[in-house]
Image (cartoon, helix red, strand yellow):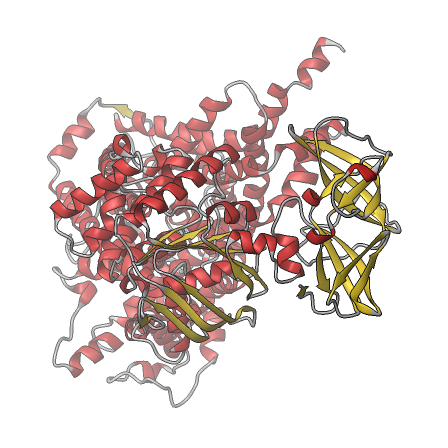
Amino acid sequence: MSRVRRILQSDHVSGWAFAFPAVFLIFVFGLVPVVWSALLSFQQTNLISPPKWIGLANYKALAHDPLFAQSVEHSLVYTALFVPISVLGGLLAAVALNRKIRGIRFYRTAVFVPVVLSTIATAIMFLWLLDPNFGLVNFLLSKVGLGPYGFFDSINGALYTIVGMTVWGWIGFDVIVYLAALQGIPQSLVEAAEIDGVRTWSMFRNITFPLLGPATLFLVVWSTINALQLFDEVYFLTKGGPGTATYVVVYYLYSLAFSQGIAGYAAAMAYVLLVAILCLTLVQLWIGRRLVYYAS
Amino acid sequence: MTTQILTQTGRPAHEEEREAGRFLFSPWHLVLIPLAVVMLIPMAWMLVTSLETLNETRHFPPVLLPHTLAPGNYSAVLRQAPFARWFVNTMIVTVATVAGNLLFCSLAGYAFARIKFFGREVVFVLLLATLMIPFQVVMIPTFIIVKDLGLINTLNALIVPNLANAFGVFLLRQFFRTLPVELEEAARIDGASRLSVLFKIVLPLSGPVLATLAVITFLWTWNDFLWPLITIYTPNNMTLQLGLTTFQGTHQTATNLLMAANVMSMLPVLLLFFLAQKYFIRGIATSGLKG
Amino acid sequence: MARVALHNVTKQFHGGTLALDDLSLEIADGEFLILVGPSGCGKTTALRLIAGLEKATSGTIMIGDTAVNGVSPRDRDIAMVFQNYALYPHMTVYRNLGFGLRERRTPKREVDRRVREISTILGLDDLLKRRPAQLSGGQRQRVAMGRALVREPKAFLLDEPLSNLDAKLRVQMRAELKRLHAKLGITTIYVTHDQIEAMTLADRIVVMSAGQALQIGTPQEVFSRPANLFVAGFIGSPAMNMLRGRASARGSADTEITAGELRFTRPGVPAGEIVVGIRPECLAPAPADATHLPGPAQPTLDLEVDLVEPLGEQALVHGSVAGTAAHSGAEEEQSILAEPSSRAPVTAVFPAGSLPGPGDRVRVRVDPGRIYLFDAATGEAIW
């Protein structure tokens, strides 16, 4: 067999031939931009005219930018609320849904469906549901003597309203993961614990919850990463307002790059976000490694 | 890791028997019913509003059961906005993206799973690394690339960057590795090329995981907002999510029409969900258990 | 420690499967009782009913002097070893052992004392700080037993605890179990499909099939005086040879029994179709000159040898004799390579020494007093 033919039929060639389309696409649109963004962050550019190199000026400006500080604060507050509420809520809902009573399929479906709806569709639903004048929620609140509330128009309440809305939309995801994990607990383990004498709360605390460790860790990490990237709802519902009450990092980033054409600064912000997410994830995983038991 | 379809409950048999006996009512219903209500009310309210006349939407206290149904709202939406166009655009983008992913991720996933080629490990780690990067970091350069390719404001801008997703490659590679390699070896001894082995032996055995990838990609693409927002600005080229926001802008007070538009935008995803619930759930559960 | 009893217990599952059919058992205080039978016979179901993991459809379950039908497992004061051990994977061995005691509010010092005592008995002292994933199969099994025993329960239930161990370890653990029981004397109910385990460990055996107890007795009783065809065919390895035969009256009290080539008489057997059972150990090579044997002449059979399996001191000689085979119902599988023939397959145990080869014809003899007779229609033994 000729050398050329041997090479052509070799695993290296066929391996690369198979992998090339996906690898090329992912590298071009997923890896190269990462490096490019780093370069952008050292430039001053509006994506149209030639850029100017300004070194670390963007990063220095970030440190002194009050709107950025506000955005960071809002992103953190949102995350600090969204993650525990949705993960814990998901756990409780999963425990409630993990039984074979009448209609359980219906209840589970009811909890899952919001997950497949888009952020915009959910936002539109809630915009109307929470309407200050004609919304159902204000109507129900008025029946108990409360409200009416502006929800998305309230400086203090807008961010919390977004928390509530996104928890509604995502709790089903947590439920699915937890339900799968709960059902992964071997029946014989539960029975052995029963025979050992555990009562309901002790069963949960000593057996169920520890064995859900990996699922909990995954959900906390995943939810945190997503929460820090909050954008769609802010763009659609509040545009960062009222005032700057719901300015979050990604919204600020977007408006800088695509509304105001300040792309270099935005890229720097994106990098800060990336670093923050990476650090937070590593910290969570490190804590998780110590606390969570993994089935080998 | 198995992918249970959440039909069993994994609890002691006698507890289940006890509860199955109390078929009609269990204390847990006290928790489950309010939960279901909270989950379903927003959609129910949207549906009701979508069928109301404009006057009834302006009613306070809100009308729970409209006196006159106005299904004409739905056709009004189609007339007052390029809704059908948006729908078709989104469908094109989604189907193309799903098809591309199925093809390219299968090829790559198979290569990473079964073919030893130079640099395989390093490249795979790099692919996985891209999953960790938030979209906002790559969004600006990707915009520049797409702009330089002249694709801005076309559907291709939405399709091309998403034709292969690292998650899909990862998912399929993991799955292919669980298949018995002897099947493929036997086929190769019988004379089949690697391509044949992939398409005639491996893929036919991969139905469920391919379905899962298709469903997840469909969902993600259909619901995508930020990227279309950045790359498309002509109403006729918009996807549904983007179109809905402009519709809301122009029809701020016509909530009945807005709700009708919203309902229509959800239908394909809801339909897919009910038909392929198994695969949605499996996809989410596996990513969670592997996480 | 206490007695355990099942009175007329029936268990029907939701799909309609009848797992237990009017089963009644009495287990004495401190006894080691084994439920044995093929898979699906209901033995594990019976065990789980005693544990409280399933509810009986009808009948009463007694632990001690109380009926425990509605009582949940945690309140029955029993302990169980599962087939896959079910150790808490996220707890150390020490915590696994002490968990049940802690849950019952036993004071810490007492827990420590009992855990260390059991750990010494079972040889787990060096493993207390490890997690189950770091233990071998045999070690895990001992931890599972320790977890059960440390609670000093009224009854100790074991569900095929040795089946996940390799053969050598299994034999070793069998002996340890027997020693443990002799030392601690806890009422033990044990389930297995392995009749050798049953024979070596039990004080009494319950042979089960299709949800019913076919015979309850000591290993020796069940072996030497099987009550019916199934028990006779299930207990004993290699399995009892069975031939179709006929009992015909011969004037006086004696009945003549014929099965293939075999012919002998026995008093008091009703005439009709019967099954003749001969244990392989009871077939010995017949010397060429039969007159040298003491006692009355033993009937002989012509054995056409098919296969010989040497076992060291002995050998299994498989072959066929004239006649028709009978089935006990306890057979696992039919042989796929055996050709259908007009002869009945028979196995004999020969001492090692000059062994026949495949194709040889040997004459074997049997002591008529050790032949079993069963009614062909009912399967009941005829004494």
| Residue at x 74%, y 50% (from the top left corner) | C334
| Near-viewer residue (A84 or C15) | C15
| Near-viewer residue (A40 or C65) | C65
Q: Seen in the image, is A151 located left or right of residue B167?
A: left
Residue B291 at least partly seen: no
Residue A57 at least partly seen: yes
Q: Seen in the image, is B146 located left or right of residue C211?
A: left
Residue C255 % position (x, y)? 79, 65
Quarter of the image that includes the C terminus of chain B:
top left
Q: In this view, does C237 lie above or below C311?
A: below
Rendered image quadrant of residue B196 = top right
List the single residue furthest toward the right: C342
Q: Is residue B254 above or below residue B162?
A: below
Q: Seen in the image, is C92 located left or right of residue C212?
A: left
| Residue at x 57%, y 42% (from the top left corner) | B100
List the single residue furthest toward the bottom: B67
| Near-viewer residue (B78 or C62) | C62
Residue C103 % position (x, y)? 21, 55
Residue B213 % position (x, y)? 52, 47
Marker count (numbered)? 0
| Near-viewer residue (C160 or C376) | C376
Q: Is residue B80 above or below residue C226?
A: below
Q: In this view, does A89 lie above or below A80?
A: below
| Residue at x 35%, y 59% (from the top left corner) | A172
Residue B269 % position (x, y)? 48, 61
